[in-house]
Image (spheres, grey):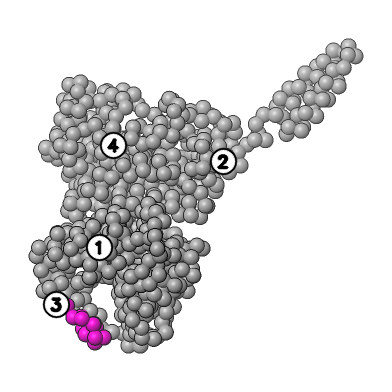
Amino acid sequence: MKRLTLALLLLAAWVHRPIGRRSMKRLTLALLLLAAWVHRPIGLRRRLGAQSVQKSAWQPSLKRLAPLTQSKPTQGTTSAPGQDSPKVVVNFVHIPKAAGTSFLSEMPRHGLSTVTNREACLRDAYDMATAQSIMLHMTMVRSPRAHFLSMFLECAYDGWGQAVTANTLFPRSGNVSVDFETWVDHFLSGERLGADAAFGCYNPQNLQTRAFTCSTGLWNHTSKHVLHLPSSADALVPPLDRALETLTNRLDLAGLVELYPESWCLVELRTKGQLPSSCNCTNAQRAQHEHITHGVPKHHWSELSTRVLEKVDRLSVVDARLYMVAANMFLRRISKVEQTLGVRILCDDRRAAFEAETGYLSNRTDQITALPRFSQTIVTSEHRNCSPLAVTAKPRLAFGAMIRNEAPYLLEWVEFHLLVGFDIFYLWDDGSTDASLSVIQPYVDAGVVLLDSTRVKASQEAVYTKMVRQANRDGVEWLMLSDVDVFVFPERAMSLRDVLTGFNSSVGAIGLCLSQFDHNGRMKRDADPVIERFVHRRKIDDPFNGAMARTSSLLRVKNVVRMGIHHPVELLDGTHFVDVLGSPLPLWPYAKGKDLPGVYEVILANHYYCKSYEEFKTKNARNQKWGSKISTWSERCEHPWQTGENDTTILKFLPELKSRLACAHSRKQTPREQGKPEDR
């Protein structure tokens, strides 16, 4: 188009040579108009939705997040060239005070349109949209404390909020902190149902989960604010399993308000097939986004007192759990995209700010344990895209273990550790007579599990030494050595990879204390995952549980010279054996670490030694057959059950683990003759 324009301009100049004819002037004018028309931006029309020319500045409303731009927030957007071209249709459902208005205002300049622009029930909107050609089903969710404060301020300062709360007892003393606590106390004092009970504005109790669980049968409900005012007491504490089913089976993406720019990166990738350059952390010019404030003053929940925040937490128990699961899924999706494309989307400053903003949620497990148990299967293979098994090209994190008749547990153990960041597994079969090898065969075929089933008798020390050598040849950086009744995971982060980057090159190995879990009052084995069935453990200060001697090890493979059982006994000069806080440990912790207090943070290791009484008896009978030391039920399981405490930290991974297990069960497993199965 540029070349054609230039040619027309030259032609116009030639025609307009001084021959003195009026007709030539008219022809010149016509050619200039034609050139201007040709040069309109149709030739720049966005292929697959390239970025708009003009962007609006945005700043996070949460002041503790690292600012992405120093520009002042603006209201509204400007249409981009080519905006009249066909748009990609998405189904974006707006949850109140979760950046929905900002997101909707940005959609046109990203070449997107939505089939709904109202605050609808997600299930209704999904059922309506499945009959149309939809590229993406999504919503945005928000950290509960920030969400609560934002709802109150909307009712207090926005024009709509002031209108609906007029002539009500909505607190308006002029002191935001006092008025907010009065508002929260109002909803704590009883079941507040209907418009009058909520001052005509929001009923904040678990509002986000209500959006995930409600259904009116009509996506275009007569009220645009169907979520604001619940009419039944059941809606105030919605069923979490129903919300998780909506999240997992009916949505392609639940973005996070706290990671708003990163959420847009995933939307761009999904709808256009490419990632904008501004999404790469190496690009100094980060994208600018909308932030519509509705006239609400700057605010942050950290300015509230602990007393008030505890009240907010009581009203948002289910929302907190839903948000934790959604955040986990979002971060894993980001990580997978980063690994696939070789870019960094979630930059270090943004990750640190996000963890600071949402860290309070990890301290709410006492409230979360009171929730109903998840349904046995949240996700089925028919409702989700199950990715095929594939080995990482350059494995960084591996787990090594010896197995013997672990068929009922192997699938969960492997899938869990894939979930938290492990790449491959070194397994030594120590004479299994059950279906263990059949269970892991798909993982062996995919190269995810490297299995030695030669049935050659070898000591544990010799097997571990062989695994370290193999991991070194494979280029593995970190190798965890333990048993398949040990589950290793990060305390606060979602991936062990993120935690391990914090250990410098002088660390040769990290000792992990084992948290000893008991039978949880269960006498019979059932089909629920191990991490769901057993959430009761010995107290940290229990003499059996609290010794640094009771550890397993994460090894930096290149620094290991000689192995013992679970621990290195010799490391390269200049490298050290440390605990998870970086403090030095003796290389022979069984003999020298008995007086050292255990450290149970940063990286956790849950040891499910007992399980149910039925499983414990089977394990002991098997150990007796193979000549191992026999433990008593009273010593290892019954006493801690009477004196221990609940620990549900690991349950943040449970919904995604169940999704992975559903996919794993759907894969065709290769039958393999393993002899007569042992009675489990």
At numbered mark 2, what does the secondary structure look like: helix, strand or loop? loop
Disc 2 residue type (three-letter): Gly
Task: Decide which of tag 1 and tag 2 comes sooner along the chain.
Answer: 2
Identify the residue at horizontal 41%, vertical 44% (top origin).
348
Residue bearing mark 3: 632
The residue that disc 2 covers is: 49
Closer to the chain start, of discs 4 and 1, is 4
Q: Please tell me which residue is depicted at 49% across the width and 36% down the height of the picture.
A: 286
Label 1 sits on residue: 513
Q: State the image coordinates of residue 253 (x, y, percent, origin top left).
A: 41, 48
* Marks 1/2: CA–CA distance: 51 Å
Picture quarter with the C terminus: bottom left
**For the residues marked 3 and 4, what is the alpha-carbon distance in whole angstroms?**
50 Å
Per the rendered image, the range of residues in magenta is: 620-632
Mark 2 neighbour class, 10 Å CA radius: few under 14, some 14 to 19, many 20 or more: many
Residue 223: name its quadrant. Answer: top left
Q: Amino acid at mark 1?
A: Cys
Q: CA distance from mark 2 to mark 3?
A: 66 Å
Amino acid on which the number 4 mark rests in the picture: Ala
- Mark 4–mark 1 Cα distance, whole angstroms, equals 35 Å
Taking the view exactly as shown, the residue that stands out farthest to the right is 19
Mark seen at residue 146: 4
Left or right, 58 with respect to 11, comes to left
Considering depth in this image, is 356 or 250 the residue closer to the camera?
Answer: 356
Report if residue 422 is visible in the image. Answer: no
Select label 3 or label 4 by which is in front. 3
Is residue 651 rendered to the left or right of residue 506? left
